[in-house]
Amino acid sequence: MGKISPVSSKYIVNATIEIEGIVDRPDVIGAIFGQTEGLLGADLELRELQRSGRIGRIEVNVDTRSGKTQGAITIPSSLDKAETSIVAAALEIIQRIGPCNAKIKVKDIEDVRITKRSFVIERAKELLKAMMDGVLPDSQELADEVAYSVRVMEITEYGKDRLPAGPSIDDSDEIIVCEGRADVLNLLKHGFKNAIAINGTNVPETIGELSKKKVVTAFVDGDRGGRLIIKELTTVADIDYVSIAPDGKEVEEITKKEIHKALRGRISAEQVKLELSRNVERIEKPQMYGSRRPAQQSQSRTAAPQSRAPQRTYAQRPSAPPRAPAPVKKQATATGPEKKVFKEMLENLIGTRGAHILDDKLNILGKVPISELQTTVKSLSSGVYAIVFDGDIEKELVKTAEKVNIKFLVGMDTKVKGNETSIRLLTVNDL
């Protein structure tokens, strides 16, 4: 009998057999050939198919336990799908083998090519990975890798505060003060070795000591957090110049051209202080004017009885109906410990554009970016006591927060007046 090569087989028929008695392997094979003979016609006769090599060697494995025989049947085939399925279905007509009842069930017909294809794909992945790992990088990749290694090696820790810094802090007459380690790394990458980081919003003593001996340029991010750091630096240290990254960008992510442009456009610390003082005046002047108005009105009321003519003229005019004062909505009052927690959270959020959602015990229920804050608040029904976030308090957020009965909104600044809402609005100045 001819045999089909395992290499050339396209399908494999997998079947199980259960026999109510004890039989041997040759009995099962004989029953398969004998009971299917003449059933499928001359073209699908099992003996002829095996002789021509279109059906391979029929493998039967049986195991006898407790007087019953169970096993598996495997038939390789190079026929097409339809013919292979017919041959497989013909096995299930066998109901007796010798004197014993039997039952054959075809589990599946396996496509050998799919198995081979899966093997090819997995092996190709392994070979490609090995090739990618072993291939030499191009010149640019080599240069970038070397430059990065040098940058990491060059960064040091300076002073008793162990601040991230470039290697030339002591050798340079001028230094650049930035916010964090990533900023120093970016400046090192582009050749600035005299940068040092303050590592937060509080200015360390090391920076104050350096500012007395060297020309200091503060280089900060182009956001509100950067401006707060400028205010802190100009108050605590002797800063000479200020440079600001492009709006919305951080020092750690800007390009070499943007770094040079920002440093060339630096302004003096005196000018920065003047602008900060002007901003303070703009905030304070309306309060000053507001305090004078009652005094002026009281003077006019005192002077009115001395002249009767204006009094008669006033009496002739129809009196305008008195305006009812705007109702002041009842707000929660923040305790000292609450304000302390709010302040610490707000300082940690500076520059992150993030928000903390708190319960009534000031535990953080969740952290979300500001872009998702409005949607998150809308989805909440209860349980939120306060929200602390790195951004301005706006009317839409206040309206949404009122619906879910939030007590405090803590932000960098507010565009909503305190008497317009029942929510207590707190900003950096309030804390």
Image (cartoon, rainbow, N blue to C red):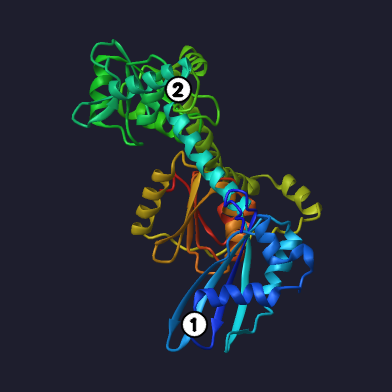
28 and 391: which one is in front?
28
200 and 36: which one is in front?
36
Tag count in the figure? Answer: 2
- For disc 2, the marked residue is 272
In percent of width and height, residue 156 lies at 25, 24
Q: Is residue 13 left or right of residue 345?
A: right
Q: Is residue 52 above or below residue 231?
A: below
In percent of width and height, residue 14 lies at 59, 67
Q: Is residue 339 visible?
A: yes
- For disc 1, the marked residue is 69
Q: Quadrant of residue 110?
A: bottom right
Mark 2 neighbour class, 10 Å CA radius: few under 14, some 14 to 19, many 20 or more: some
Q: Amino acid at mark 1?
A: Thr
Q: For mark 2, give the secondary structure.
A: helix
Q: Is residue 329 left or right of residue 366?
A: right
Q: Which mark is residue 154?
A: none
Q: Is residue 420 visible?
A: no
Q: For mark 1, give the secondary structure.
A: strand
In percent of width and height, residue 31 lies at 62, 77
Mark 1 neighbour class, 10 Å CA radius: few under 14, some 14 to 19, many 20 or more: some
242 and 90: which one is in front?
90
Q: Is residue 389 left or right of residue 316?
A: left
Q: Is residue 362 above or below residue 277?
A: below
89 and 311: which one is in front?
89
**Residue at image location 50% in from the left, 64% down from the top:** 384
The furthest residue to the front: 1
**Residue at image location 55% in from the left, 28% down from the top:** 247
Q: Nearer the viewer, mark 1 or mark 2?
A: 1
> If you read the primary sequence from the N terminus, does the residue marked by circle 1 or circle 2 appear first?
1
